Amino acid sequence: MPESGDTTWKVGELARFTGLTVRTLHHYEDVGVVVPSRRTASGHRLYDERDLRRLYRVVALRDLGLSLESIRTLLADEVDLAGLLRDQLDHVRRRLSALRALRTRLSTLVDTADSAGDIASTDLLALIEEVSQMEETFANYFSQDQRARLEQRREERGQRVIDAEIAEWPQLIARVQDEMDAGTDPSDPRVRPLARRWTELLESFHGGDEGLRDSLYRMQRENSETIRERHGGPSPEMIAFIERANAAD
Amino acid sequence: MPESGDTTWKVGELARFTGLTVRTLHHYEDVGVVVPSRRTASGHRLYDERDLRRLYRVVALRDLGLSLESIRTLLADEVDLAGLLRDQLDHVRRRLSALRALRTRLSTLVDTADSAGDIASTDLLALIEEVSQMEETFANYFSQDQRARLEQRREERGQRVIDAEIAEWPQLIARVQDEMDAGTDPSDPRVRPLARRWTELLESFHGGDEGLRDSLYRMQRENSETIRERHGGPSPEMIAFIERANAAD
DNA sequence: CTAGGACCTCACGCGACGTGGGGTTCAAGC
DNA sequence: GCTTGAACCCCACGTCGCGTGAGGTCCTAG
């Protein structure tokens, strides 16, 4: 009588060809996402084809990062799956931007440690505290939302491009400094391409977003000393110089 | 007698201006990362300045994603902090690439759901299964490492650029199809720019990595039917056509 | 009939706390 | 001095998706 369509599997078999563990299948039964529709007389689990299909769905949904609980209700009731996925995407995006920020911090630290050669752990600890304090300062000027947008833009435009732009700042600042040292007038045509590039680099930071631009300016104004010392930022005089150059343009 | 330097704080105060909760401070004591150096006669915790400094370090390290356990040993013994950070960076990178892959999957699904308008949850479920099956196929051709490299390149080059390239494929395929329909010879100069662009787009997928290229070709060969039906991929004839065009070049 | 492999059901562990619950202690107002 | 409410104390379970034994039963081939 056991014809086609009545195929059943025991946990071990199911585990083997789904790549899950037996314990996982037990757990899925405990929380009610995949309950085998039959048992043998002695209590061994028997999964049929419907169970198998359900299991595949569960795995697919789990791989999207959904919780077992939401998967359970999803497969039980008629739930707005599209909405759920949107929420999940939102959630993933947020985690991504947090993780990217973390990676940036970590790689800065590792780079510093590498370039300083055999840096002592205590010095590195001090550096870490410094960085975390910087982050805090940064967070005072840019809202959660703005920081997320910055990460977003970083992703869209590509890490490599951004890195190149960041690397360009010190060079640009040095060249402007040369002109200032030489007593060149801000309206001098030799300054124009420098001032223009300056504006372009700024543009590509804030991307035309006024809020971002204002926050950046405010942070620069209120912390110019620190930024100059630690990161080679421009002096207020240099900024005034560029502004006069742009005004003359 | 309580002069400067003897300032102490109770948990509540500490919690208020570090932004942590009282429970968190209790927990930090339980696991031994920040233990208040004194207690009042009645058992209330008293943190002094040393404790406060230690707490700031703990928070900074925790924000780098380190576990409380490793922070504890780190602050106790002389541990290779730089090495720890390198490991952590590695770990974060791996999580990042996994999360990026997840985001890509999710946004594909959400886009599909949106473009299909009011798609039924059951249809969407079928689609999810399909996508997860596709992922599985994909994983058969590209190793873990290769997939991570693909995500890596995607991040470096920028989402926007990649999206534009992907959007270009169907157009390019249609134009080549037109030439084939018109009976144009592969060596015809009109085909040359098309074939060249074809090669460029391929290049920017594998980025010169032979392993990636070979895997891609193999996947295309062995699944050309499915790829053509579901994603409008090129037919084997078209690929042969482009190859002849390149040979003639 | 026996061995060993597959199955069963508890039940604790993980990590960084959140969240009560039930009981002291502190500081201010009467 | 007494009361009241805020702040403190400790204990202990819950979270999430299983991993990892422990101790026992069942199945199947030799």
Image (tube, coloured by chain):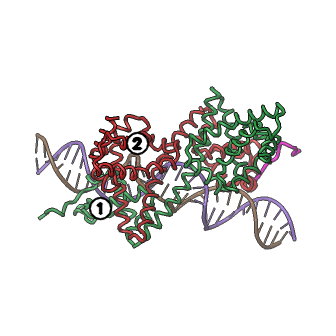
Chain colours: A red, B green, C brown, D purple
Residue B112 marker? none
Q: Could you say which is closer to the camera, residue B41 or residue B65?
A: B65
Q: Which residues are magenta?
A: A1-10
Give the residue drawn at x 88%, y 44%: A3
Mark 2 touches mark 1? (CB < 8 Å) = no
Helix, strand, or loop for circle 1?
Answer: helix
**Disc 2 from disc 1: Cα separation:** 48 Å
Q: Which residue is mark 1?
A: B53
Task: Determine whether, in the image, residue D7 is placed left or right of residue A66.
Answer: left
Residue A45: % across, % down: 73, 51
Q: Which residue is mark 2?
A: A193
Q: Could you say which is closer to the camera, residue C24 or residue B118?
A: B118
Give the residue drawn at x 27%, y 60%: B45
Q: Could you classify mark 1 by the number of other residues whose Cα lies within 10 Å: few (under 14), some (14-19), or many (20 or more)?
A: few
In the image, is residue A8 part of the stretch drawn in magenta? yes
Q: Could you classify mark 2 by the number of other residues whose Cα lies within 10 Å: few (under 14), some (14-19), or many (20 or more)?
A: few
Q: Quadrant of the N terminus of chain A?
A: top right
Q: Quadrant of the C terminus of chain A?
A: top left
Whether residue B16 can be seen here? no
Give the residue drawn at x 23%, y 61%: B42
- Residue flagged by tag 2: what amino acid is it? Pro
Q: Quadrant of residue B237?
A: top right
Residue B138: % across, % down: 71, 49
Instruction: From the image, state whether disc 2 or disc 1 is nearer to you.
Output: 2
